[in-house]
Each structure stands twice: as structure tokens, then as C-alpha cells.
Amino acid sequence: MAELLRVENLKTYYNTLRGIVRAVDGVSFTLRKGEVLGIAGESGSGKSTLAWSLLGLVPPPGYVKEGHIYLDGMDITRMSEAELRKKVRWKKISMVFQGAMNALTPVYTVGRQIEEVFKIHAPHMGKQEVWNRIYELLESVGLHRSIAHRYPHELSGGQKQRVVIAMALALEPDIVIADEPTTALDVVVQAQILNLLKRLQREKGLSIILITHDLGVIAELAETVMIMYAGKMVEYGPADLVFTRPKHPYTEALLKAIPRLRGPVDKLIYIPGQPPDLTRPPPGCKFAPRCPLAMDECHEKEPPLFKLVDGRLSACWLNRNEALEAGG
């Protein structure tokens, strides 16, 4: 599959009164056409900041410190705000923002809000053409066209989530970022939204970046998994390998914290301690203070991303003996 997106050594920081927060600190990955990449990690690991960086929407006082984001060969980190709006946002890459209710304006109807996308990004389209497209979009996500004339407060949580997905698809982008698309939804509606995303990905050939703390959601959709911790990528590889044979202790700990439907019922494992303060991260491996397998070296020297024999990447000193090479 052709490569659509390549991120190289991306660093996104926030200037605060307490110091510089290294929210995304040297992340690199690729996304191919039609691929679903799942990004998981605890709250504060840098997942949403990474997504905002890909759209050039990092909120102040945040900024992209260094690195490159190549979208169809274009380095969007070198683009102006006008170029990003004209060439990238919603046309090449769009986003389903976390919390559908917060992403919708309560005083505008659904149709009016989707219409705004076309007014800003496709001003050449006529009014009737725009509204025909709005009805088509709503029907494509399983909603009746009458929803276009209703206000957000008149819709259920699942309907609002479908509306936000429809908005993201308005200009038929190649990549859709879904940031916690099932948060605050009951399990039945969660399943409906996941099935909708799977259908859209299959029918439209979408590339999807799925951001969540729920590894069960990633297991349902993603082909490739990135695990983030304290702003860094600690494991990256095919979903089946990451879930069945994790190579990083943090990934293993996350998987052990998931309740099992089948098999023996054991006491759930939790990860002790707290994620580090990103204004003053600990030396060495950022996970070392919470890691049951940590060695002296882990507290002193930060591990590189080791490329393993099975093609995965893992930032753990325990993997060095089976690594083909080390970098980054």
C-alpha cells in the first residue's frame, strides 16, 4: 500500500509557568493508504497532542518544536496557516474530535454546522449542491436526512457522534483521525460506532488514526498499534503481535489490566504510581520508576527504539539482545 503520511522525530512542546512540557517528544511513524493505526496510552501520554500536531492545530501555548510531517510528500510543518486551511485540513486529513457534544455548537442546527465546512473549504459549491451533499453524508453514517434540521441537544450521544463523523467525511479526506470516538457512549452504541468506522474504512478506503485509552477498541479496528508513554513511542508494530506477545513492560501492563471474558478470572493487575511530570521527566527510561523489571541501567540511560527481528519497534533495554538495530 502507498504511503500517505510520514512523521519524523516530531516534538511538540507547551511553554508553561512551571516549565516546558514535552507532550510529544521525538515520535516517528508512517501511515499507508487504507491502514488503521491505533494509538494507545494513559491520559497525558501525548496522544491528542500528536493528533493536533498533524492538523497544525496545537492550542497555545503549544508549538511544534521540531520534526517533519509529510502528507503526500508535502511537509506541512513548513506551511502557513492559510496553506494548511486551503490544502490540508478536511481536504487531506480531518478529525473526529473527542466529545461530540463539545464539538457541536448548541445554537446551530446540524445541517448549518456541516454547511460551514463547505463555506470555508469549498466556497465554489452552490447552496443546493451543498445541502444535497449534507443529506448524503448523514445517510452515509446511518442517520435520516431530517437530522440536518435538528439541534445537537435533540440528538442522542450516538447520533451526535455520527454527525461529527459525517462532518469529518465532508470533503472526502484520505485520512481521518478519530480521537476517543466511543468515549461516554454505552456499549451498544460503542459497537455501532465501531462498525460504522469499519464500514466507512472498507467502502471508502480511508486511512484512520484511532486514538484511545481502550485497547479493546484498538483490537477491534487497528492493523498497526503504537503505544505511547510520557510523550514517547514505546512500542510499535502489527496489532496481532503487540497484543499477543508484547515486548515493552508498559504494553504488557496495559494488557494485563483488561478484564477477560473467557478463561480463569484472576485479580486485575494495575500499574502502580503516576505518569511522570513532563516538565521534569526522570532520567533514563520514563517508565522505569513504575516498571517491575527495571534495572540500574534503565534509571540512568534512556533506551533507543530497538528494531526487532519481527519488524516491531520497542524502547526497552530488555529487547537489545534480539534487536537488528537501534535508532532514534
Image (cartoon, rainbow, N blue to C red):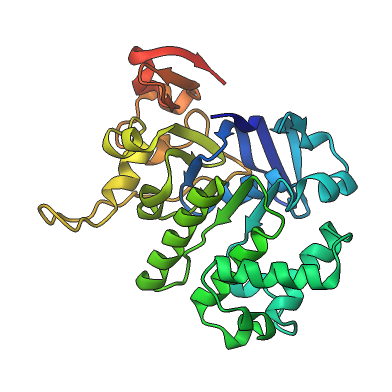
Give the camera-side residue of 120 and 40: 120
In the picture, which quadrant includes the C terminus?
Answer: top right
Please give the name of the residue rendered at 45% of the width and 20% of the height, measured from the top-left corner. 306
Q: Where, by quadrant of the figure, is residue 118 drawn?
A: bottom right
> In the image, residue 186 lies at what x, y percent?
39, 73
> In the image, residue 302 lies at what x, y percent?
50, 25
How many labels sit on residues? 0
Is residue 120 placed above or below 104 in the rendered structure?
Answer: above
In the shown orientation, is residue 301 left or right of residue 149? left
> In the image, residue 124 lies at what x, y percent?
89, 59
Please give the name of the residue rendered at 62% of the width and 35% of the height, measured from the top-left corner. 25
Can you name the residue that lies furthest to the left here? 264
Q: Where, by quadrant of the figure, is residue 243 drawn?
A: top left
Give the camera-side residue of 280 and 167: 167
Residue 45 can be seen in this image: no
In the shown orientation, is residue 183 left or right of residue 60? left
In the shown orientation, is residue 128 left or right of residue 286? right
Is residue 165 placed above or below 223 in the rendered structure?
Answer: below
> In the image, residue 4 lies at what x, y percent?
63, 34
In the shown orientation, is residue 225 left or right of residue 283? left
Please give the name of the residue rendered at 37% of the width and 39% of the height, measured from the top-left corner. 250
Is residue 73 placed above or below 34 in the rendered structure?
Answer: above
Residue 140 can be seen in this image: yes
Is residue 107 placed above or below 306 in the rendered structure?
Answer: below
